[in-house]
DNA sequence: GCCGTTTTCGGCCCGACTGTTTTCAGTCG
């Protein structure tokens, strides 16, 4: 059973949970949580790394001798003696109780020791039988909140996709802006960091008088329940199940508050420590030397007080951005305005909703110079995928439209299916006439890792393939990524002169941020594509940009920031098989 | 458990809100 980075991270996360319930040293607990986070995001396969280096792990932040030994143990045995010991002392299922809002380690321990409660179901029964209130520190209200939280949890609120949360955020922002005295409104939190899903919305308002804002907020028409409501802070749950936290601050503190509520938590902790080292204190109101505030009105002022340049929200994950900022090596992140074209789109010829002409005009209106039309191929029958004859016909239509339209150039392409054995769904003769060939996996998601990887490597070996579409095939919250060795794929792409796609559909966002970083490190360009199936879908490019920025990509790392004249040679190089390229 | 221009010990981020208490522990972000 191969051990992946996520498996090691899961072991450390469970150890942290169990240690917390045992009331262990909080800094020891933090060390395990920190290690879990570092490993989960680590772009290279630790197991492979250990195998190559003869058991030597490179120095990772927050992982010292002891944790490195545990990583080796987990990779070698699939388990961890410490976790086994902890599970002997506490049932493993008890960590589920920690996920219930309102329950922390202290209460979970009391529930287990005094009532024998090990699972949410048992807790539900205990609360219904009125046994929870008998515990010291638990009152009627707490029992009631536990009941509600478990029932809400069963309803499966979970995390919301960024694009979905965005719809609710827009209505709320407009509502809050209309309140008298409100100067600024912004969504902070993971939403501002452009994470692919968000657990809640963190709204920040600048206003001299918080009272009216707090009052109006809990009166918002979509509020289902109010979880908390103080003088400057409140939490509500919308009817859709999305939790929204509001904080109102004075404009003088807005920057510090925005920084604080944007997070990530890990980023904030590092900043606070830096403040301490400089004899300062950083909190959500500002940077203080003693009682004197030295910064806080803007985020820039706070970073400057810590001798740092401004760090973009998408980078604030404590994945090296603070070190990079300190060394003056922050990336100049790609922006939506840098995109000159889009290399993946569909029309009514396959499963798109709009005509070739409509898509061309919409792309132009979205500020793009070129758009590749890349229908599905015949294998994907449910999308009415193209065969060579229909593909040739579409190429003729594209020629006619290109002659007619100005300000936009259509490129001839195909999103050709990669068959189970890695061969392609269309013959080379059909691919040879195109500007761009995108290879895509739409079937056989469950092949074992080696076969899935070999399949994709073989597809990249076809001399006409230029781009690998949505490389892991995941659908956020619906379908897991298929099991592939992404590093091998990235390196093969480099070798073959191919590129990887970041599909900007909010359901896909595939490549992930971590894989973007991997591609950059290996020197492989990424294409940020809408995969548009309608004229509206070009708006999704912003989510792709967000993901790319989280992956540290600069304009130069993105294929389709090139103007058409510079793009064509990059595509053409692949379109000519090496053996025919003689003088 | 990690870490080090305070270096092998003694630190380790900070404040709001709730509920159950009568001054604060627990939880959350």
Image (cartoon, rainbow, N blue to C red):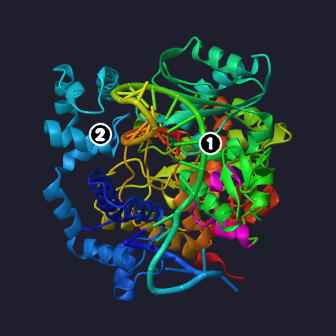
Q: Residue at x 77, y 47 (%)?
A: A296
Number of marks present in the image shown:
2
Label 1 vs 2, first from the N-terminus: 2
* Chain of the residue that carries numbered disc 1 in the rendered image: A
The vertical placement of A554 against A57, above or below, is: above
Q: Is residue A578 left or right of residue A12?
A: right
Corner quadrant of residue A125: top left
Q: Find residue A345 and name its label.
A: none
Q: Is residue A114 visible?
A: yes
Q: Is residue A317 magenta?
A: yes
Instruction: Estimate the x, y position of residue A426 in percent, counting from the top left.
Output: 47, 53
Quarter of the picture containing the N terminus of chain A is bottom left
Magenta residues, start to end: A312-327
Q: Which residue is mark 1?
A: A261
Instruction: Estimate the x, y position of residue A363 in percent, counting from the top left.
Output: 74, 38
Depth check, mark 1 against mark 2: the one in front is 2
Instruction: Estimate the x, y position of residue A88 in percent, counting from the top left.
Output: 13, 58
Q: Residue at x 30, y 33 (%)?
A: A137
**Secondary element at image label 1:** helix
Q: Nearer the viewer, residue A395 or A169?
A: A169
Q: Is residue A437 left or right of residue A328?
A: left
Quarter of the picture containing the C terminus of chain A is bottom right
Q: Is residue A286 magenta?
A: no
**Secondary element at image label 2:** helix
Q: Which residue is mark 2?
A: A107
């Amino acid at each position: 059973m191969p051990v992946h980075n996520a498996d090691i991270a899961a072991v450390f996360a469970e150890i942290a949970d169990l240690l917390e319930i045992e009331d262990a040293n909080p800094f020891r607990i933090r060390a395990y949580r920190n290690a879990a986070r570092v490993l989960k995001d680590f772009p290279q396969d630790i197991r492979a790394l250990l195998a190559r280096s003869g058991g030597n792990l490179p120095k990772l932040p927050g992982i010292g001798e002891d944790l490195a030994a545990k990583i080796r143990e987990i990779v070698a045995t699939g388990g961890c003696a410490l976790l086994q010991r902890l599970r002997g002392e506490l049932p493993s299922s008890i960590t589920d109780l920690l996920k219930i809002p309102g329950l922390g380690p202290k209460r979970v321990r009391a529930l287990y020791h005094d009532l024998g409660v090990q699972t949410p179901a048992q807790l539900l029964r205990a609360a219904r039988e009125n046994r929870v209130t008998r515990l010291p520190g638990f009152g009627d209200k707490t029992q009631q909140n536990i009941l509600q939280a478990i029932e809400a949890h069963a309803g499966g609120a979970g995390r919301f996709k960024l694009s979905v949360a965005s719809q609710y955020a827009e209505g709320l922002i407009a509502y809050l802006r209309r309140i008298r005295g409100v100067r600024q409104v912004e969504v902070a939190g993971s939403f501002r960091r452009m994470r692919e899903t968000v657990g809640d919305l963190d709204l920040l308002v600048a206003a001299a008088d918080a009272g009216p804002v707090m009052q109006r907020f809990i009166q918002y028409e979509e509020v289902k329940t109010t979880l908390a409501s103080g003088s400057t802070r409140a939490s509500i749950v919308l009817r859709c199940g999305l939790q929204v936290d509001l904080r109102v601050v004075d404009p003088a503190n807005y920057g510090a508050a925005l920084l604080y509520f944007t997070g990530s938590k890990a980023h904030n902790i590092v900043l606070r420590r830096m403040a301490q080292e400089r004899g300062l204190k950083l909190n959500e109101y500002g940077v203080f030397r003693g009682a004197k505030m030295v910064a806080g009105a803007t985020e820039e002022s706070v970073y400057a007080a810590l001798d740092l340049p401004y760090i973009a929200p998408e980078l604030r994950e404590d994945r090296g951005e603070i070190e990079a900022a300190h060394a003056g090596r922050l990336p100049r992140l790609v922006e939506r305005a840098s995109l000159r074209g889009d290399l993946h789109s569909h029309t009514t010829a396959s499963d798109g909703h709009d005509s070739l002409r409509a898509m061309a005009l919409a792309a132009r209106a979205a500020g793009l110079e070129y758009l590749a039309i890349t229908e599905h191929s015949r294998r994907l029958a449910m999308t009415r995928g193209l065969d060579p004859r229909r593909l040739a016909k579409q190429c003729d239509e594209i020629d006619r439209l290109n002659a007619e339209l100005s300000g936009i150039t259509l490129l001839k392409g195909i999103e050709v299916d990669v068959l189970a054995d890695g061969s392609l769904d269309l013959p080379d003769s059909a691919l040879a006439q195109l500007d761009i060939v995108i290879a895509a996996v739409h079937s056989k998601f469950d092949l074992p890792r080696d076969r899935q990887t070999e399949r994709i490597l073989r597809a990249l070996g076809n001399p006409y393939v230029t781009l690998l579409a949505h490389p892991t095939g995941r659908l956020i919250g619906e379908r897991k990524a298929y099991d592939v060795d992404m590093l091998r794929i990235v390196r093969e792409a480099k070798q073959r002169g191919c590129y990887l796609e970041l599909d900007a559909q909010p359901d896909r966002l595939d490549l992930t941020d971590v894989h973007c970083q991997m591609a950059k490190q290996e020197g492989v360009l990424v294409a940020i594509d809408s995969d548009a199936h309608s004229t509206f879908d070009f708006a999704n490019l912003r989510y792709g940009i967000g993901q790319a920025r989280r992956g540290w990509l600069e304009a130069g790392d993105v294929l389709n920031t090139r103007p058409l004249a510079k793009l064509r040679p990059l595509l053409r190089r692949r379109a000519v098989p090496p053996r025919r390229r003689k003088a």
